[in-house]
């Protein structure tokens, strides 16, 4: 069976392609960066990289799964969930030890920024199949012009409460200043932040018990569903994988829940404050 490397990521031991195949998904600024990196790789090694880029997230996972099951996965693939690829991916532990000169456990404890996640996977399955690609902080970007038209003023000396945030969204929608009050990245990672805001989560602090069905977590989900039911958020993003960034960039949504990784692109492309 051909093996792949998952990016978090998943690298193949053999390739049916003459070139290295990179499976990618993006609706943000990182595609230019990954293109620059692959071009540099080609100059250094003489090996060409073919990037299979799918712009819509819902198209990405089925395509990657189909390629893996057919025995011809890409050599490298960007992923945020490593567990589905355990049977397909190569073990990176020997490579870490070879190129760092450290025992894997030592590297995991003292070097890896992703220590907690890697450690749990390593302890349970005895291998690590991904390498860190990126990290960012959650952010709410907002259109100052739309806020001004709607008569909404965000607090400057403290965070919004959930009730205040919801009231602001309702006011924006009712004012007609924007088609939608909010657009929200289609990402379990991004949604998890809303769980934490409500006091819930996926795992407890010890990492032993699942709390996705806790009272607080359910309240977060119900709130998120309500925002969609009241047409404050475009349903197409979370139901069909439509690109969230375009709603904010085109002035259709007043706010955008994404990450700080979008700063460079928004600064360059937006025509409003």
Image (spheres, rainbow, N blue to C red):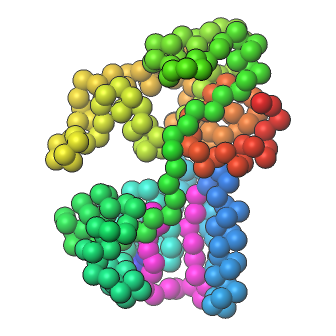
Residue 111, relative to residue 210: is it above or below? below
At x 31% / y 28%, what residue is drawn? 199
**Residue 24 included in the magenta stretch of the image:** yes
**Foreground residue, 9 or 137?**
137
Which quadrant does the N terminus fall into? bottom left
Q: Residue furthest right?
A: 271
Name the spot of residue 161 as percent of width and height, x first.
Answer: 46, 17
x 70%, y 18%: residue: 147
Residue 70 horizontal side relative to residue 170, left or right: left
Does the magenta stretch mainly form a helix, a strand or a loop? loop
Tell me the residue at 66%/61% (across/down): 31
Dividing the picture into quadrants, the one containing residue 53 is bottom right
From this view, report whether residue 53 is shown above or below residue 247: below
> Is residue 151 visible in the rendered structure shown here?
yes
Comparing 272 with 21, the one in front is 272
Query: Which residue corresponds to the image point at 52% horizontal and 85% vertical from the top-left?
Result: 16
When asked about the image quadrant of residue 247, the answer is top right
Please state which of residues 166 and 179 is positioned toward the viewer in this rendering.
166
Residue 80, picture quadrant: bottom left
State the residue in front, 157 or 239. 157
Residue 26, horizontal then vertical, whole percent? 61, 55
Does 254 appear in magenta? no
Using the image, determine if residue 150 lies above or below residue 270: above
Which region of the structure is painted magenta? 5-25
Single out the residue that lies furthest toward the front. 157
- The relative height of residue 264 versus residue 144 in the rendered view (above or below) is below
């Amino acid at each position: 069976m051909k093996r792949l490397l998952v990016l978090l990521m998943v690298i193949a031991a053999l390739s049916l392609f003459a070139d290295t195949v990179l499976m990618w998904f993006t609706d943000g600024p990182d595609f230019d960066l990954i293109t620059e990196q692959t071009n540099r790789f080609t100059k250094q090694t003489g090996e060409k990289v073919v990037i299979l880029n799918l712009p819509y997230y819902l198209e990405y996972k089925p395509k990657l799964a189909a390629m893996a099951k057919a025995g011809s996965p890409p050599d490298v693939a960007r992923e945020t969930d490593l567990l589905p690829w355990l049977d397909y991916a190569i073990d990176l532990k020997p490579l870490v030890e070879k190129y760092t000169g450290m025992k894997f456990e030592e590297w995991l404890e003292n070097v890896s920024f992703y220590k907690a996640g890697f450690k749990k996977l390593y302890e349970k399955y005895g291998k690590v199949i991904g390498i860190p690609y990126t990290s960012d902080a959650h952010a709410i970007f907002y259109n100052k012009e739309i806020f001004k038209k709607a008569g909404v003023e965000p607090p400057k000396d403290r965070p919004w409460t959930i009730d205040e945030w919801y009231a602001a969204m309702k006011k924006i929608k009712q004012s007609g200043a924007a088609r939608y009050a909010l657009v929200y990245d289609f990402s379990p990672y991004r949604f998890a932040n809303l769980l934490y805001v409500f006091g819930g989560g996926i795992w407890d602090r010890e990492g032993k018990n699942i709390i996705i069905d806790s009272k607080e977590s359910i309240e977060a989900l119900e709130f998120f569903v309500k925002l969609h039911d009241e047409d404050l958020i475009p349903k197409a993003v979370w139901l069909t994988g439509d690109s969230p960034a375009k709603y904010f960039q085109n002035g259709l949504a007043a706010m955008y829940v994404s990450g700080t990784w979008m700063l460079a692109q928004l600064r360059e492309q937006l025509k409003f404050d």
